[in-house]
Image (tube, grey):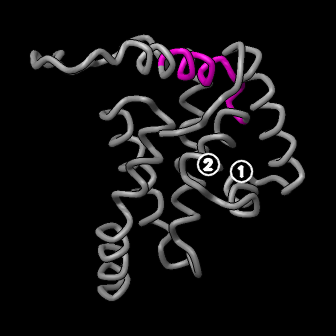
Amino acid sequence: MHPDQQRDFAEFVVARSDSLIRLAYVLTDDQHAAEDLLQSALAKTAGHWRRIRGNPEAYVRRVMYHEQVGRWRSPRWGRERVVDAVPERATGDRTAEVDTRVTLCQALRALPVRKRAVLVLRYYEDLSESEVAKIMGCSIGTVRSQTHQAIVRLRELVGGPVTLEV
């Protein structure tokens, strides 16, 4: 890679890593897996940096999406789960909030991969339908229908209205 391209790539990584790691975390639901996913996507992006024009972040998001879909399809995915130690400090009773969040997370995991990804990209990442369509390699109409179907299914799984907040 040419030194100018290396500098541009390094500047991109510094400027956009916070946003990209949040997307990776939502896709993986694990901080360590999110870091691995982002690192893998950035390594693939660096190899193609010379050819990427316009919006390199969209390219990285697309790579992350496809990489994670491949991991979801792998029979080894989800066998182990690393968790941090539970904090010892006391907080107010947030049982209802936690129950809602757990229920929503379980319902999201029950969705097919594409429906889950479209909800993450639309509501967590706050991307437009056209941006989601580009990342997922489909039409805007497909994004709309997948979003509608996913929300309907979430309502069925949760048993009521769904508020997609992160």
Q: Which residue is mark 2?
A: 121
Disc 2 residue type (three-letter): Leu
Q: Position of residue 11 (x, y in %)?
A: 31, 77
Q: Is residue 152 above or below residue 20?
A: above
Query: Which residue is the extreme one toward the bottom?
Result: 4
Question: Would you say the residues marked 1 and 2 are in contact, meaning their CB atoms lie under 8 Å apart?
Answer: yes
SS under mark 2: helix
Q: Categorize mark 1 by other alpha carbons within 10 Å: few (<14), some (14-19), many (20+).
A: many
The segment highlighted magenta reads: 102-114
Is 42 displayed left or right of 130 in the figure? Answer: left
Residue 108 part of the magenta-drawn span: yes
Q: Position of residue 87 (x, y in %)?
A: 14, 19
Name the mark on residue 136: 1
**Disc 1 marks which amino acid?**
Met
Quadrant including the N terminus? bottom left
Q: Position of residue 15 (x, y in %)?
A: 33, 71
Q: Residue furthest left?
A: 88
Q: Nearer the viewer, mark 1 or mark 2?
A: 2
- Is 121 rendered above or below residue 97? below
Residue 1 in magenta stretch: no
Residue sitting at 67 percent across and 56 percent down?
A: 135
